[in-house]
Amino acid sequence: MRLTKVWGKLRKKNKEHYRQFYFCVWFAVMLIGSYLMMLCSPLVSETLPVGGDSRKQVYMIFCVAAVGCIIFVVYATGLFLRYKSREVGVFLALGTDKGRLSRALIWEMGQGVLKIALLGLFTGGILALLIGKIFEAIAKEATDSKFAFTLPGIGLGVLFSVVIFLIILVQAVRFMRRSNIMDILNEQRKQESVKKMVSPRYLASGLLLTVTGLLVGFVLPTVVVNLFHHWLGSWTNLFYLLTLVGLYQIMVYSISCHRRGKNPQKYYRNLVSYGMLKFQGRSIVRNMLVITLLLAGGLFAAFYIPTQSSSFQTGLEKNEALYSWYYTEDADELTQEDVLDLAKNFGVEISNYREGEFVQAVGSGVNRDLVDENGNLIEQYEEQHAVYEYIGASQYEALTGEKISVEDGTYYMIQSPDAYENIFNKFDDMDKVYLDQEDTFLPLNFAGTVIYQSLVNGDWGFDINARYVVSDRDYERIEQGTGEYPKVRQVLFDSSRGTSAVDFCRELYRSFAQRMSDSMKVGSNYDAYLAKTSGEDSMYAMKAVYNPDNPVQESDWQFKPTLVLLEEENGLLTYAVYLLLFLYVAAICLAAVEIISYARSQTVGLAGRQVFEDLEKLGANHTYIRRVLKKQIQKVFVLPTVVGSLGILAFEVLMLGMNDGRYTSGEIQMIPVLLVVILAVSLCQYLMYRFSVRKVTGQLNL
């Protein structure tokens, strides 16, 4: 009889072992495959901004999930080979040629893994398709992009399957290269004990490595840029590996270091449990590390949802006017009479309508987009830097109702309540205005900032989006001395609320977009002066991306009107793809945590079956044995949950502070929400722990 047929018969007799091994491979391929297919689909790839924080976070979480799944498969393969060791040892003892047996084992595992990997890719595709269609249904008003399978998504999924396949084959080859038959024969009985004797110094070094990896990898680059204006480069990301090593040391210490201390009775009462943990220590540590990484990745994705939702809502509340837009003087835009007539058709009452005029002119500034060959940030002063917008003090007062006194030769910068200076943007960069008709400069000095969110252009109102308040006399001088760029008309007003007001906003958006001039069909980074000096292919010359009939679609349009009522109504849809993607990532990562925790708890319990039987023969009752069993399973759940949860919470809080060098009131209020998310995940872990204990005690008849 051929060895392949013998392996087939043995497979039928050991279905449980094969089932567990194949499930682990299938789950890893399905998890990563579906993630990649979703990530590379047009629905996601065309929605996440290139180079944005959202895309970077998605990639980071993917790396965590992929590393966790690879470690998970390595562990499952090692466990499966331990189960196969007795069969292999018997064949060798009966005189079977080792080379022939190796080829048969590799074929047996290879063809099985290949089938399971294909099944994993297929089911992963089905899962990605189902989730993608749900995304489409919920976010159909937010994006025109559809879910579709792409060659990169499928190709990367296949590549991950090939990596898993090769890892398994390498493990099988290494297993068969052992020359001692008795080692192979006794492999199933071999314990993966932690032989290393560790002390509190080992724990201290683990904590130090964990903190150092985070600080050097994440904090140090930002600190160096702010203090020394120097980019360290991407090599600092390698320090995150120190965090991984530190976490491993913490896990090893929790398994191997148990001392009598000041309470020797507690030590002796748990002596059996401590010994069993050491015997299986290495495999337990590997699983604890995988669970910690996946849990941290899942929570990090889950944190994105409340933080972004809160940020969006807080941003809307800063607007002083419910309606705000501006347009160039060459556009045949909505007049006050048009707005009142349109509002009357929808039964909406308009109040506090006001208009003001800005003049556009090139001003000086500092270019901080340049870096030398050593990574040092270059600050280059430019007399003609970008086109800014200027308004006279009296017109500013008419628009805002806030009285302001501006001396001749000075200016105030219009900013948002949360505006702050950083290494890229300063309030006082502009010190002169170029008068193109006179070919002269009007010097101006920075006098301070004024806060009025509804007049701020872009996200921050710096650089090409900057707006300034000057004295009425200086405004007239700039108006008379320039003419290359059209004036800008600003409109602000309020209205009653309700469903009819939202419908009014939709029609207002559509009418505004359809009536705008060609000079307004530009992207958010457009600058007329920089577009002329940088070339048509530069980011400063990009055209607008918008949809007049669908205002909630992701757009890149400099003149997009701010209609607070409409954005409140469609706020969730605006971030629908982002939120759903991160919710999907969180779900699959946390599902992996639950499955791995459960699988490992079963292994921990069943591996100690012989010990439990011996304890019972020595007189131990079921209550004592159950207590020992619970101690074993608790290690799989408790420490990874605590370390993963608190570690990622600390990282999230640190990231909120490092983004802008401070903590806003909204960010502080968000921390309790993040704690609620952690409590919810911890509750799921606790319920899975209870279920695992009940399952194992039933299998052991306890």
Image (cartoon, helix red, strand yellow):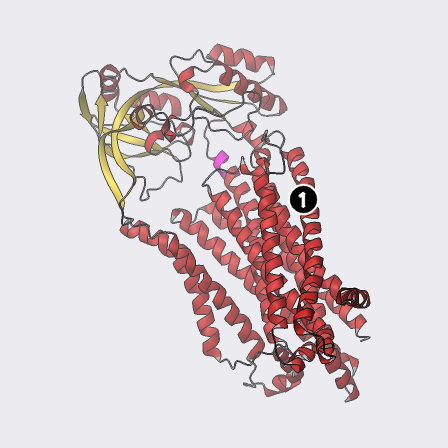
Point out the residue furthest to the bottom here: 618
Quadrant housing the N terminus:
bottom right
The quadrant holding residue 18 is: bottom right
Mark 1 lies on a secondary structure that is: helix
Q: Nearer the viewer, residue 127 or 109?
A: 109
Quadrant position of residue 283: bottom right
Identity of the residue drawn at 65% across and 57% down:
592
For disc 1, the neighbor class at 10 Å (few under 14, some 14 to 19, many from 20) is many
The answer to whether 233 appears left or right of 140 in the picture is left
Q: Please, is residue 573 above or below residue 26 in the view?
A: above
Look at 61% across and 43% down and name the residue there.
154
Q: Quadrant of residue 177?
A: bottom right
Q: Is residue 514 above or below residue 433?
A: above
- Residue 610: % across, % down: 75, 81
Q: Give the overall secondary structure of the magenta segment.
A: helix
Residue at the image point whose x is 56% and y is 15% from the top: 343
**Observer-nearest of 72 and 658:** 72
> Residue 595, percent across and down?
68, 59
- Give the residue at mark 1: 125
Residue type at numbered disc 1 = Gly
Magenta part of the chain: 313-319
Residue 392 image point, x, y percent:
29, 22
